[in-house]
Image (spheres, rainbow, N blue to C red):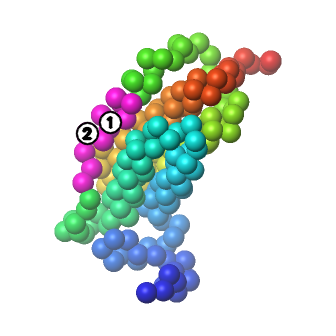
Amino acid sequence: MKIYTKTGDKGETSLLGGTRVYKSHLRIDAYGTIDELNAHLGLLRDQEVNKKRAKELYFIQDRLFVIGALLASDPEKGQIKKPGFSAGDIAFLEREIDSMETSLPPLSNFIMPGGHPVVSMAHIARTVCRRAERCIVLLNEASFVESLILEFVNRLSDYLFVLGRQLAVELNIKEITWHPGD
């Protein structure tokens, strides 16, 4: 099977279920942004400092593939077999956030992204996650989106923020706090 099919040459693609839509469709934008986020997480997972959390980052990437499949499915074609996704996936993120926060100093200012390339990667992933969330919210206004997807993506951005802070601690990098006008 060839990688190119030529079926998208005129700006259309197929949802799972066969429905043809333009590549500018809200559903395509939503799962495309999830795909972009997944690529950023792969880069973040590949960093040496994250070797100890490679399994949890891989699990999150797996969940993003599931979310991508759910978003790529035509909601009018309910008979399509879809991968499982549950509240337990959200609980996993919450446990990881809570675990990391036990060793972090309390926040008193906004954090300026940066200080180390790996910390910056976590913040880039966080901002792509927030964009994915906005895309999914827009899609949800126009069509059906499982509420667990929105909850997971919202919690994932929190996880990525806390991960950036945790990475700064592990790398012995002083967090850059934002002080207006400084």
Residue 125 sits in which quadrant?
top right
Considering every residue shown, the one lying at the far left of the view is 79
Q: Is residue 71 magenta?
A: no
Residue at 45 percent across and 44 percent down: it is 54
Work out whether residue 160 or residue 7 is closer to the camera in this orientation and state it: 160
> Circle 1 sits on which residue?
92
Residue at 33 percent across and 52 percent down: it is 145
In the drawing, does residue 32 fall left or right of residue 116? left
CA separation in Å, label 2 and label 1: 6 Å
- Residue 33 in view, yes or no: no
Tags 2 and 1 touching, CB below 8 Å: yes
Mark 1: give few (<14), some (14-19) or many (20+) Cα within 10 Å.
some
Mark 2: give few (<14), some (14-19) or many (20+) Cα within 10 Å.
few
Under mark 2, the amino acid is Gly
In the drawing, does residue 86 fall left or right of residue 52? left
> Circle 2 sits on which residue?
88
Residue at 46 percent across and 76 percent down: it is 13
